[in-house]
Image: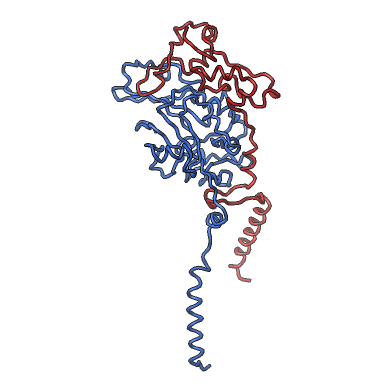
């Protein structure tokens, strides 16, 4: 056997080893989709795993199924466009789990919109607002203003 | 060997038949063509961000973080809201405190006072993964841990990602980050788990002002598709050729 063949045999051995290793290490369900190898080479079970991800926010209609009085009065108010869960926290599997939701009554929650930012070219300027560092600094907004049916009196 | 006229003619016919064959029979089909021939998805999720409607409340960021189990008090987020303030003297100020999670509650920008009288224009721009048609983050993944689903959503396979960070570097929009708990690349999934159940994304549901909308771009009757087709929309960094599927209404030239 000539000397030239020996390194070639070593290379061939390395190639065989790499292919065998690849066969055992790569999950068998690797696949491609519509977009070919460049964009959709993936484990076929991965999208299914993402689909199983737990939904936490259930939406306003879900809350209205039981809390219909609160729901209906709120839907007539200026805060109708705000989701219950934006303040009451994600329902997840409420009422089973969690049994009680934590309500965010903080000033921080209200001034997300109602801290006055008089910006031209932004609808933020149209929302009635206060200067949080001057307007009744130590009080809870909800002590005077009902968040479900807000009015300014 | 003696060649008869009959043999010669037969050889000619065989030769002509063989030379015609390779054009069609030997064509190698790409996996995408095979897949398209079998079945093509009739869903392509797209997104509209109406910057005119955004008031910077940050409910979208809060909802996203809680829905998708993104650590709440760590400075990472799948979606974020930027504030742009363009002064009359031409200066531009941009900030996104805690990714906009707690909203924008003060007129000062990063501690510096801003006199509203000197503002030429100021507005909020929500951002998220653009779910590009040609996602550079997917191209660079060395292990096949990130991919585009048939519905056009780019996902990360958490059990297969090695955390090399190439995708985080390659995203022109800065939409990817390292998940501090799972130790893998993390990004917006368009709330894939909600869309497949017929729900909207958590950020869309949480937005009180309709500044965010999600819809099926392959459905001509979808409100999102109608707006993309009939209104003046723009995408971010069009020149990169990534073909973003998040369309912006009222985008300003200062937005990057």
Asked if residue A78 is positioned above or below residue A41 in the image, the reply reads above
How many numbered discs sit on the rendered protein? 0
Can residue B71 be seen by looking at this rendering? Answer: no
Going by the image, does A52 lie left or right of B249?
right
Asked if residue A19 is positioned above or below residue B59 in the image, the reply reads below
- Examine the image and state in which quarter residue A130 appears: top left
The chosen color scheme is by chain
Q: Position of residue B86 (x, y in %)?
A: 34, 24
Instruction: Tell me the blue chain.
Output: B
Residue at x 50% of width, y 77% of height: B17
Q: Nearer the viewer, residue A83 or A27?
A: A83
Residue at x 64% of width, y 19% of height: A101
Residue at x 46% of width, y 9% of height: A152
Instruction: Tell me the red chain.
Output: A
Extreme-right residue of the structure: A96
- Examine the image and state in which quarter residue B123 appears: top left
Q: Nearer the viewer, residue A101 or A59?
A: A59
Q: Nearer the viewer, residue B208 or B68?
A: B208
Q: Position of residue B159 (x, y in %)?
A: 64, 41
Asked if residue B190 is positioned above or below residue B140 in the image, the reply reads above
Can residue A22 be seen by looking at this rendering? Answer: yes
Q: Position of residue B39 (x, y in %)?
A: 56, 53
Where's the C terminus of chain B, which quadrant? top left
Residue at x 65% of width, y 45% of height: A45
Q: Position of residue A95 (x, y in %)?
A: 68, 22
Going by the image, does A10 lie left or right of B60?
right
């Amino acid at each position: 056997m000539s000397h030239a063949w020996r390194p070639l045999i070593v290379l061939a051995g390395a190639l065989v080893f790499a292919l065998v290793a690849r066969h055992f290490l790569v999950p068998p369900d690797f696949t491609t989709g519509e977009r070919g190898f460049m964009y959709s080479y993936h484990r076929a079970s991965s999208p299914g795993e993402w689909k199983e991800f737990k939904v936490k926010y259930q939406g306003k209609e879900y809350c209205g199924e039981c809390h219909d009085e609160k729901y209906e009065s709120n839907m007539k108010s200026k805060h109708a466009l705000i989701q219950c869960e934006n303040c009451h926290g994600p329902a997840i599997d409420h009422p089973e789990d969690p049994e009680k939701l934590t309500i965010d009554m903080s000033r921080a929650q209200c001034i997300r919109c109602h801290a006055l930012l008089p910006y031209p070219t932004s609808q933020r300027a149209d929302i009635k607002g206060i200067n949080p560092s001057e307007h009744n600094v130590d009080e809870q907004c909800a002590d005077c203003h009902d968040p479900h049916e807000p009015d300014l009196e | 060997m003696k060649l008869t006229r009959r043999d010669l003619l037969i050889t000619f016919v065989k030769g002509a038949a063989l030379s015609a064959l390779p054009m069609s029979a030997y064509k190698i089909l790409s996996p995408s063509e095979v897949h398209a021939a079998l079945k093509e998805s009739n869903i392509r999720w797209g997104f509209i961000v109406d910057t005119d409607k955004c008031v910077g409340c940050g409910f979208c960021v809060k909802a996203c973080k809680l829905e998708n189990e993104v650590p709440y008090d760590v400075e990472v987020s799948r979606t974020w809201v930027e504030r742009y303030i363009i002064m009359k003297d031409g200066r531009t100020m941009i900030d996104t405190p805690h990714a906009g999670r707690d909203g924008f509650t003060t007129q000062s920008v990063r501690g510096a006072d801003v006199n509203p009288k000197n503002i030429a224009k100021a507005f909020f721009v929500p951002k998220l993964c653009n779910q590009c048609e040609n996602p550079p983050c997917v191209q660079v993944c060395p292990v096949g841990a990130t991919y585009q689903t048939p519905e056009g959503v780019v996902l990360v396979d958490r059990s297969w990602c090695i955390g090399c960070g190439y995708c985080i570097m390659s995203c022109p929009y800065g939409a990817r980050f390292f998940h501090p708990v799972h130790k893998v690349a993390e990004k917006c999934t368009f709330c894939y788990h909600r869309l497949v159940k017929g729900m909207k994304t958590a950020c869309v549901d949480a937005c009180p002002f309709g500044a965010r909308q999600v819809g099926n771009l392959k459905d001509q009757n979808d409100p999102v598709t109608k707006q993309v087709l009939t209104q003046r929309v723009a995408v971010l960094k069009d020149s990169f050729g990534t073909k973003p599927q998040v369309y912006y209404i009222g985008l300003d030239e200062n937005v990057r």
